[in-house]
Image (tube, helix red, strand yellow):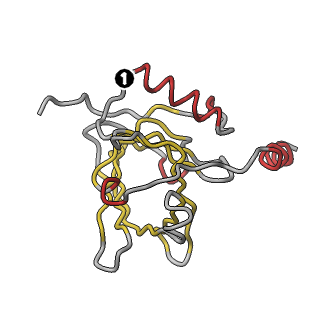
Amino acid sequence: MALAGATLACASAPPLEVVQELDVQRYLGRWYEIASFPQSFQEGCVATTADYSLRPDGDIRVENRCRTETLDGEERSATGVAWQPDPDAAPAKLRVSFFRPFWGSYWIVELDADYRYAVVGHPSRNYLWILSRSPQMEPALYAALVEKVEGHGFESERLRRTLQPAARDD
């Protein structure tokens, strides 16, 4: 019954809108996970980061890392590839694969003009990540992003903050 309700809720939601422009070069680099809809593959993860770099073939190398249970816990990592199936018409709709031939949708639904934060979701609205270029995010910005994800039809009560180390002054 819960599954039927979730299916109906997704069916009645409007199509998920994404940002209209994406400069892949500016998107590359390190992102810190501020919050997410926890997934089984993230179980026990804290201090989660994603590093994006350009591969020689033009696709994007994705390296996700986290610590197990505590900030000084054992490091886990997974490496995958992302690509833009239609970079001209939908540059913010990426696909990502950690286990080829299987892939998932990686849709950027919010992106700061200066690429300081991003919100990534899935058209089913069952996956969501709030990302930042720094390990901490101002509470007012986080609250504003939570409102925005609600506006996109995501259930914000499913969001869980990700433990990150304190920001450093470099």
- x and y, in percent, of residue 24 in the image: 36, 60
Which quadrant of the figure contains the N terminus? top right
Can see residue 140?
A: yes
Residue 156 in percent (x, y) is at 62, 31
Q: Residue at x 51, y 25 (%)?
A: 144
Tell me if I can see residue 47 in this picture: no
Residue 50 drawn above or below residue 91: above
Farthest-out residue, left: 170
The C terminus appears in which quarter of the rendering? Answer: top left
Question: Residue 29's quadrant in the figure?
Answer: bottom left
Asked if residue 160 lies left or right of residue 58, the reply is right
For this view, does 89 lie left or right of residue 169? right
**Quick one: 51 or 38, which is closer to the camera?**
51
Seen from the viewer's position, the closer of residues 72 and 102 is 102
Dot 1 corresponds to which residue? 138
Instruction: Report the front residue among 69 and 81.
Output: 81
Residue type at the position of mark 1: Glu
How many residues crowd around disc 1 within 10 Å: few (fewer than 14), some, or many (20 or more)?
A: few
Which residue is located at x 55 percent, y 29 percent? 146
Q: Residue 142, image x and y in percent?
A: 46, 26
Q: Residue at 35% across / 44% down in the picture?
A: 115
User: Whole-percent x and y of residue 160?
Assistant: 52, 33
Q: Nearer the viewer, residue 35 or 119?
A: 119
| Vertical position of residue 143 compared to residue 52: above or below | above
Secondary structure under tag 1 reads loop
Quarter of the figure with residue 134: top left
Tally of numbered discs = 1
Indicate whether 60 appears above or below 76.
below
- Rendered residue at 47%/36% (across/down): 35
